[in-house]
Amino acid sequence: MAYPDFPYRIDTQGRTATTTRLDVIRDRIEQVLFTEPGERVMMPIFGCGLNRLLFAGVSEAVIENTRSLVATSLQTWMQDDIDLSEVDVYFDNGALFINVAYIVLPTGESQQATFEREVSA
């Protein structure tokens, strides 16, 4: 089955671009992580609020808060699509990296995705 790609775009044949279910799930995880609560009018509590931690500096407390925030948000917003296995957060060369390991429901496929954002100095 084909799913509309995110972000929405037109493909080279003038149709809605499509993708696989695994790509859709990865895109939805990214949406959860980088959407700020209040950003979506019809879903004001949707999102992770991760951007507010990007400027907090690098410390063990920030890393643990980020990991906890990511895990809680994904378990809240993606509970019908994934079973979260592991979240790893680390900073490297001025960037925040988030590794998410999960199992796709109901197929049981193990997947892993890495997301990156630059942080303030």
Image: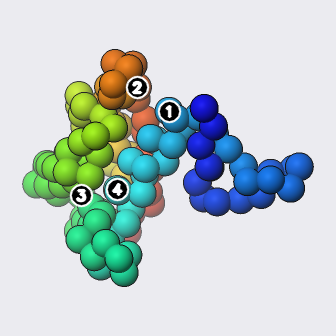
Residue sitting at x 72%, y 49%? 17
Image colouring:
rainbow
Specify the quadrant of the image occupied by residue 44.
Answer: bottom left
Q: Position of residue 50 (x, y in %)?
A: 29, 63
Give the mark nearer the N terminus: 2 vs 3: 3
**Is the residue under label 4 in contact with that under label 2 (CB below 8 Å)?**
no
**Marks 2/3: CA distance?**
28 Å
Q: Position of residue 100 (x, y in %)?
A: 33, 36
- The kind of secondary structure element at disc 3 is loop
Mark 2 vs mark 3: give the one in front: 2
117, 22: nearer the viewer: 22
**Is the residue under label 2 in contact with that under label 1 (CB below 8 Å)?**
yes
Please name the residue that numbered disc 4 is placed on.
Answer: 33
Name the side, left or right, on which 47 lies relative to 12: left
Q: Residue lying at the far right in this picture: please name it.
A: 13
Please name the residue that numbered disc 2 is placed on.
Answer: 111
- The kind of secondary structure element at disc 2 is strand
**Marks 3/4: CA distance?**
18 Å
Please name the residue that numbered disc 3 is placed on.
Answer: 58
Please name the residue that numbered disc 1 is placed on.
Answer: 22
Residue sitting at x 40%, y 25%? 111
Residue sitting at x 33%, y 25%? 106
Density class for disc 3 (Cα within 10 Å; few <14, some 14-19, many ≥20) is some
Give the mark nearer the N terminus: 2 vs 4: 4
- The kind of secondary structure element at disc 1 is helix
- The N terminus lies in which quarter of the figure? top right
Residue sitting at x 37%, y 52%? 96
**Marks 3/1: CA distance?**
32 Å
Give the mark nearer the N terminus: 1 vs 2: 1
Give the mark nearer the N terminus: 4 vs 1: 1
Mark 3 vs mark 4: give the one in front: 4
